[in-house]
Amino acid sequence: MSSQEFIDLRSDTVTLPTDEMLEAIRRARLGDDVFEEDPTVKRLEEMAAEKMGKDAALLVTSGTQANLVSLLSNTRRGDSIILEAESHIYYYEVGGLSFIAGLLPILVKGKNGYMNPSDIEAALRPKDIHYPETTLVCIENTHNRAGGTIIRPEQIKAINEVAKAHGLKLYMDGARIFNAAVALKTDVKNFTKHVDNLMFCLSKGLSCPVGSIVVGSRDFIERARKFRKMLGGGMRQAGIIAAPGIIALEKMIDRLEEDHRNARLLAEGLSKMEGISIDLSTVQTNIVMFNVSGLGISAYNFVELLKSKGVLCLPFSDTKVRMVTHRGIERHHIEKTLAIIEELGSKILNRG
Ligand code: TLP
C-alpha cells in the first residue's frame, strides 16, 4: 500500500501545501532574512503580529524551535517555570527546556489541559535562598495530550491574574490556537490578549509545509531573533516558507471548522462501539483521543492492526489512541475509518 492510499489520521502535520501555496512559493519576492531583507518574511511577520494583537513576530522553523526560543527569551538559565504535566514542551521536546534553556520544570496537573489558578499558586515557592526563581507560566492551547481541548479566554485571564500577582510572565504554546478560535467562533485576540507572548504553527491544520511563528513585544522578539540564530534557525531566502504562510493566514483558518465537524463525526461513531471508550466532552476541535482497553489489546497493537487495514493513527499511551482530522481527510474517509474499526473491533471481541 503506498502512503497515498492510507487514511492518514496520525497528525495534522501531514497536510500538504495547496496548489495556491506552491504557486506563491514560485512567485515569492526573496532576500536574505538574516539581514532582515526578505520582503515576504517581513510581510508574514507583520500580518501575524497584527492578527495576534501584538507588536512583533518572528518566523521560525518549527513548533519545537518556537517554544525553545520563547523559553530562552522569557527566562534566565536556572529559573524554574510552571508547565502543565502533559504539556508538549515537557513531554515531546527532547527535554530542550532543561538541556538547552537550563530551566527546572514545575509540573501542575491540569483538567482537560487547564491548570487551575489555585494549583498554580500552590506550586509557587516563596523567595528563598534554596529555591530557583520561578519566572514563567506556560499554557498549551489547544492542549494536545488532553485531546485538543480548549483553554477558554476567561480561563487564560484567570491564570494570567495569578501569574501577574506573582510577577510571572505567561506564555502560550498556541500551536493550534486557530482551532480554538474557530471552535469558539471568536477572534483569536480574545485568547492572545491575556498572554505576554505565544507561538502558533503554520505547518499543522493551516497546511503549510514548514514553519511556526513567535509573537510578542518588540523587545521579546529581538531576543528571540538572537536565540533563533544561536539555535541555527537563521534562514536566508526564507520567503519560500513565508509565502504559503501568508496564504494560510488569509485563507486556511475558516476551513478548520470542517476538520472539527469530521472529528465530531468520528468521535460520535467511536462512542457507539463496543470495547472503545471516549469522553465526548473532550472532543472540542480536530483531535480525537479514545481508549481501546475494552478490546483487550494495547493501543500499540490496535494501531498496528488498523495500519494493516489502511488507516494510520498514533498510540498516545498503552491504552489511548489519537486520531487527528485535517485538510486531507473528508467525510467519506471518516465513514470508511469507522466501518474498518467496527469490523476490526467485532473480530477482536468475538475471538476472545
Ligand atoms: N505535535 C506533534 C507531535 O510532536 C506530537 C503532533 O503530531 O501533534 N506544541 C504542540 C501543542 C504540538 O502539538 C506540537 C507538535 C509542537 C508544539 C511542536 O511542533 P513541531 O512538530 O513543528 O516541532
Image (tube, rainbow, N blue to C red):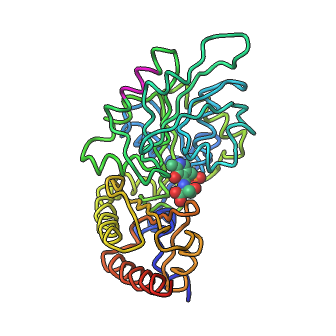
Q: Which residue sits furthest left?
A: 185
Quick check: 170 above or below 199?
above
161 vs 301, nearest the viewer: 301
- 264 left or right of 246? left
- 100 left or right of 168? right
Quick check: 55 above or below 322?
above
Quick check: 298 above or below 342?
above
Q: Which quadrant: the N terminus? A: bottom right
Residue numbers of the magenta segment: 157-162
Residue 279 seen in render: yes
Magenta: predominant secondary structure element? helix
The magenta stretch spans residue 160 = yes
Could you tell me which residue is drawn at 40 percent across and 56 percent down?
A: 248
Could you tell me which residue is drawn at 47 percent across and 39 percent down?
A: 110
Could you tell me which residue is drawn at 55 percent across and 60 percent down?
A: 316
> x, y percentage for residue 114?
42, 38
Could you tell me which residue is drawn at 42 percent across and 27 percent down?
A: 159
> x, y percentage for residue 138?
52, 34
